[in-house]
Image (cartoon, helix red, strand yellow):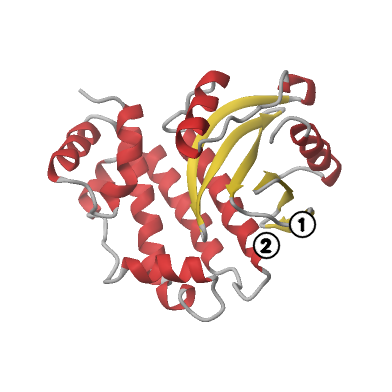
Amino acid sequence: MPNCWSIDPLITPYVDGELPAADRQTVEQHMRGCTPCRARIATEQAVRDLVGASRSELTGAGAPPGLRARCTAKGGPPARTPLSRLWRARLTPLALAATLAIVVGSAFLYPLAGSSTRVMAAELTVDHMKCFLLNAAVRTDSTEAAVKGALLTGFDWQAQLPERPEQAGLELVGERTCLYGKGRVAHVMYRHEGRPVSVFMLPDDVRRDEVVNIFGHRAAIWSVGNRTFVLIAREPAEDVERMASFVQASLR
């Protein structure tokens, strides 16, 4: 019987209808006995429905070219999750999916006519909230070795994570791969005194240093070589700047 870790990378292509029949059967067999993975699938379906419903706004002239292309490529009416499947899930997974749908929906209402850096910060802030919600159901591997291995495999990046993060009040949570308007980004998840903190790495992307306030969060942005880093937290400005400086000293 496959476990949640082997199912995790199949969920998004399952929702998008892109899995071969054998893999689709594997996912369906697993989720029949796994409430967290059923919640994850319902959540991803809710996100897809929102993208489909907002396609005309997202593919308009104000959206970034990469985001317009991704939304246009979806095509066709959004698929709907059968209500019978949702009602069989327990209350907590339903609350998770509903909360995520609200978060993502608010992101897509964001006025895309803003600067590209601000739009990027908005997308990553949504991913920050989404991934921590999902991590409550399907936990990531929190070991430093596992996170470094995932970053090397997924991005050919020999990441130098901060040594002794506890000195800055940080605890490593894990790693996920996320999507934004220009492609795939690495997402390293921490907690700062129990509160979520994300560090994103955008490959082949260079931006000026700045701090963006978005959706009640602060996003500290800096670049090293051909990589852009974004630290996101719902913390006071001085704490975000202190954490960003601590992380910058290590990450390359």
Going by the image, does 163 lie left or right of 31? Answer: right
Picture quadrant of residue 145: top right
User: x, y (%) of residue 188?
Assistant: 58, 35
Question: Are the residues flagged by discs 1 and 2 in contact, CB closer than 8 Å?
Answer: yes
Tell me the quarter of the image containing the C terminus. Answer: top right
Farthest residue to the front: give it.
Answer: 225
**CA–CA distance in space, label 1 to label 2:** 9 Å
Q: Which residue is mark 2?
A: 117
Tell me the quarter of the image containing the N terminus. Answer: top left
Q: Is residue 90 visible?
A: no
Going by the image, does 67 lie left or right of 129? Answer: left
User: x, y (%) of residue 195?
Assistant: 67, 34
Q: Identity of the amino acid at label 1?
A: Arg
- Judged from the image, the secondary structure of the residue bearing numbered disc 2 is helix
Residue 175 vertical position relative to residue 144 in the rendered view, above or below: below
Q: Which residue is mark 1?
A: 208
Q: Nearer the viewer, residue 178 or 251?
A: 251
Mark 1 or 2: in front is 1
Residue 75 vertical position relative to residue 37 in the rendered view, above or below: below
Q: Residue at x 59, y 34 (%)?
A: 189
Q: Nearer the viewer, residue 89 or 8?
A: 8
Picture quadrant of residue 241: top right
